[in-house]
Image (cartoon, helix red, strand yellow):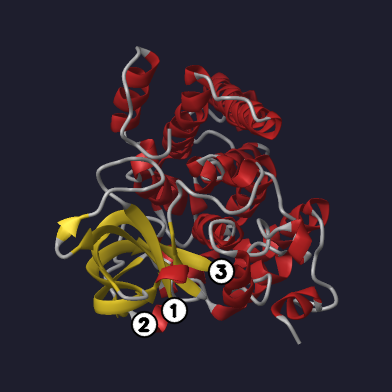
Amino acid sequence: MTLTDTAAQPTGPASAPTSADEILSRARQAVPELRKYAAEIEKERHLPPAVVTLLRDIGVFRAAMPKEWGGPELTSMQQAQLVEIIATGDVSSAWCAMIGMDSGIYSGYLEESVARDMYPRLDMANSGWIHPQGHAERVPGGYRISGNWRFGSGLTHCDWLAAGCLVHRDGVLEPDPFTGDERQWRIMLARPDQYEIHDTWFTTGLAGSGSQDYSATDLFIPEEHSFSFGSPRRPGPLHAAPDAILRKMAGVPLGMARAALDHVRELASTRIDRETATPWSADHRVQSTVAQAEMELAAVRAAVYSSLEAQWSALERGDEMTTDARVATALARHHAFRTGRRIVHALYDLVGGASVYRDKSPLDRWLRDANTMNQHAVAQDSILQLTGQVLLGGESRSPFF
């Protein structure tokens, strides 16, 4: 039986979802179950097997798999929405979902036969830090890589673990033949058991993401198990620009903020102010805080999805991306992270002392999750400097815009 014949066979259980609508519906139905697991997820510092199974059953890890393989091939907007829904249930699960569904995106940068061999099932998860932290020495047939990588979110349940490297030949940096850059940045894929895993993930928030460190010394990676974002093999908007893996990230803070708002609005229906005996639903301070948060969330959410839709449409048409279009999604994403944290913090202050109990209020976990996720590169002020430089006529060295 050929690789093509194998890939044409059923790739999951008979009930596996085959469309975006079905996956999004399953995600909504799973939110209450994810909330039940939230405390355990945080305590274990990684996703328990039952939660991983739940995400697979939803169709999370197959979300970006190509239609010609039988996958649903969600658009960037649908992927962001999927992550957003899951984040209303549990933020660490959403973070791992966001990373795990990169399997379908990565497969589009590999040779077709290799991708089919590496991803024989649609429901396979990726993990790994793609920043070129490692050293790859070119050898016959591939590379020998060495390095230490951080933030391996979901590496405890992934099928392939990525490691970003700069390519060297005889100890000298090798230029990128696709982009013309003086450095060649490649993503190396290996099984998680081929690396040394370091239990370092003791953090303020996103504790359940299991984003541990990992390392390798002189690990051989076949050439075909590596790729450059500058040379996609599969056509279409999901691979036409190298920022595809980032587009869905805003779903995490959007879903977190939505969950926090829903929680406080539910509290307000029965709570009475201790000092004034005023029902919260009639308290002007509560009314204004909730309205302000809803306004900010609606605005930033509209910016995220409208910028993604504009980018997707332009890439579908094959248009050359304008400067404004190139940075719009990055700015909306940055704003979503910052706004999500601001909303959670405002609601935490509104609820007051009752917010601080880990075993009684999810606001404590959301606040810690918000602070930790805002340390990611996409939420840093350096994004504003970089995008501002591009908007004012400068050049960006970032591969993502």
C-alpha span from label 3 to label 2 = 16 Å
Amino acid residing under circle 3: Ala
Picture residue at 33% right of the left edge, 52% below the top: 185
Q: Foreground mark, 3 or 2?
A: 2
User: Which image quadrant for residue 119?
Assistant: bottom right
Q: Is residue 16 left or right of residue 172?
A: right
Observer-side mark, 3 or 1, equals 1
Provide the residue designation for mark 3.
Answer: 125
Helix, strand or loop at label 3? It is loop
Does 41 sit above or below residue 10? above
| Separation (CA) of disc 1 from disc 2 | 6 Å
Q: Do we see residue 30 in this rendering? A: yes
Q: Is label 1 in a helix, a strand or a loop? A: loop
Secondary structure at numbered mark 2 = helix
Residue 219 locus on image (x, y percent) = 29, 78
Q: In this picture, is 357 found above or below 320?
A: below
Residue in front for this viewpoint, 301 or 291: 301
Alpha carbon distance from label 3 to label 1: 11 Å
Q: Which residue is mark 1?
A: 191
| Other residues around mark 1 within 10 Å, as few (<14) / some (14–19) / many (≥20) | few
Picture coordinates of residue 97, whole percent (x, y)? 56, 60
- The answer to whether mark 3 and mark 2 are in CB contact below 8 A is no
Callouts 1 and 2 close, C-beta under 8 Å: yes
Quick one: which residue is furthest to the left in this view?
171
**Type of residue at label 2?**
Gln
The kind of residue on which mark 1 rests is Arg
- Relative image position of residue 365 (x, y in whole percent): 44, 54
Q: Which mark is residue 370?
A: none
Quarter of the image where the N terminus is located: bottom right
Q: Find disc 2 in the rendering and name its residue.
A: 194
